[in-house]
């Protein structure tokens, strides 16, 4: 075969390959557009400086300005039935992934003993690092998917949930929103991490009190006081729990 014929053959193969690549690229762009078509055009930046994320289009944003953690809820509507995507960023209280995994398994057991239903804990890969996936379900009532992950010195939680029909309807949108997540890294001390843990305990205790479970709230309060025995808010909550 002459050099001219070889070059012509290579040129034809290259043109065919480029045509295939163009089609694949076009399909990937279309797939990308479809995946993110339900997300907002503007990126949400956490005012506490922990993360950026593109929320679902049209979902209602609820912030927690008094909470030291980066924390936001994206709600599909103002009233039930609704789905919710919650994102929390904080200084990590964990030394490594194994400690996080152990904590998640303990939390899953507590969740199941308090609410019933089923809880599954899986080790997965998210953002190219090890993460924990928790699937919590009360048949016919509620379903939630959590991803918990350590990035840098930060600890992030993503929780998407709602009634089973709302969960199924918005799951793909919620996962696409999570995929748009960008961590923001800052330097935090051990004291910052403990402050964020205390804020989490206070919030959870208040939730339990709102549903009339003083016994559950007291357990969480005591856990918080074991970290900061002089915390005024926790001491107030303990008095409420004991009344």
Image (spheres, rainbow, N blue to C red):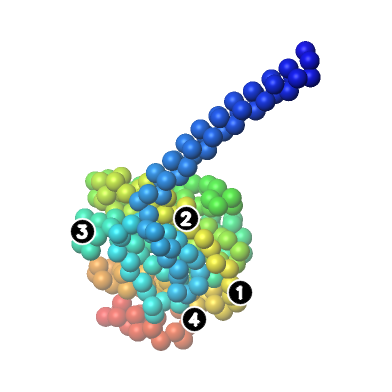
Q: Is residue 195 left or right of residue 74?
A: right
The residue sitting at the top extreme is: 1
Q: In percent of the image, x 25 and y 46: which residue is there? A: 165
Foreground mark, 2 or 1, reads 2
Residue bearing mark 1: 187
Q: Residue at x 59, y 25 (%)?
A: 16
Residue 178: quadrant of the picture = bottom left
- How far is the residue under mark 1 from the one under mark 4? 22 Å
Name of the residue lying farthest toward the front? 4
Q: Which residue is mark 4?
A: 228
Q: Is residue 69 above or below residue 38?
A: below
Return the x and y of residue 144 as percentages of the image width and height.
35, 52
Disc 2 to disc 3, C-alpha distance: 26 Å
From the image, state whether disc 4 or disc 2 is nearer to you.
2
- Image quarter where the N terminus lies is top right
- Counting residues from the start of the chain, the first of labels 1 and 4 encountered is 1
Q: Tell me whether the residue at label 2 lies in contact with that at label 1, contact meaning CB atoms closer than 8 angstroms.
A: no
Residue highlighted by disc 3: 80
Q: Position of residue 92 (x, y in %)?
A: 55, 67
Residue 108 appears anywhere in the view: no
Q: Residues within 10 Å of mark 2 (few under 14, many from 20)?
A: some
Say what secondary structure mark 4 lies in: loop
Which of marks 1 and 3 precedes in the sequence?
3
Residue 188 appears in the rendering: yes
- To which quarter of the image does residue 108 belong? bottom left
Q: Mark 1: which secondary structure? A: loop
Residue sitting nearer the eye, 4 or 198: 4
Mark 2 highlights which residue?
180
- Kindly identify the residue that appears in the image at 61 percent across and 28 percent down: 15
């Amino acid at each position: 075969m002459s050099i001219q014929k070889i070059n012509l053959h290579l040129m034809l193969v290259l043109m065919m390959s480029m045509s295939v690549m163009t089609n694949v690229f076009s399909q990937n762009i279309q797939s990308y557009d479809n995946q993110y078509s339900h997300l907002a055009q503007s990126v949400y930046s956490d005012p506490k400086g922990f993360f950026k994320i593109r929320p679902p289009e049209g979902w209602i944003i609820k912030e927690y300005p008094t909470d030291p953690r980066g924390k936001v809820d994206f709600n599909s509507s103002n009233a039930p039935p609704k789905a919710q995507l919650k994102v929390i960023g904080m200084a990590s209280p964990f030394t490594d992934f194994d400690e996080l995994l152990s904590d998640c398994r303990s939390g899953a057991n507590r969740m199941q003993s308090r609410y019933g239903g089923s809880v599954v804990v899986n080790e997965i890969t998210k953002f190219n690092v090890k993460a924990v996936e928790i699937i919590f379900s009360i048949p016919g009532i509620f379903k939630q998917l959590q991803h918990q992950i350590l990035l840098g010195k930060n600890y992030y939680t993503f929780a998407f949930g709602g009634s089973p029909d709302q969960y199924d309807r918005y799951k793909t949108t919620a996962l696409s929103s999570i995929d748009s997540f960008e961590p923001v890294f800052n330097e935090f001390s051990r004291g910052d991490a403990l402050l964020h843990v205390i804020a989490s305990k206070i919030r959870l205790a208040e939730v339990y009190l709102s549903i009339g479970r003083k016994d559950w709230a007291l357990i969480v309060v005591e856990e918080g006081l074991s970290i900061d025995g002089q915390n005024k808010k926790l001491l107030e909550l303990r008095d409420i729990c004991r009344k």
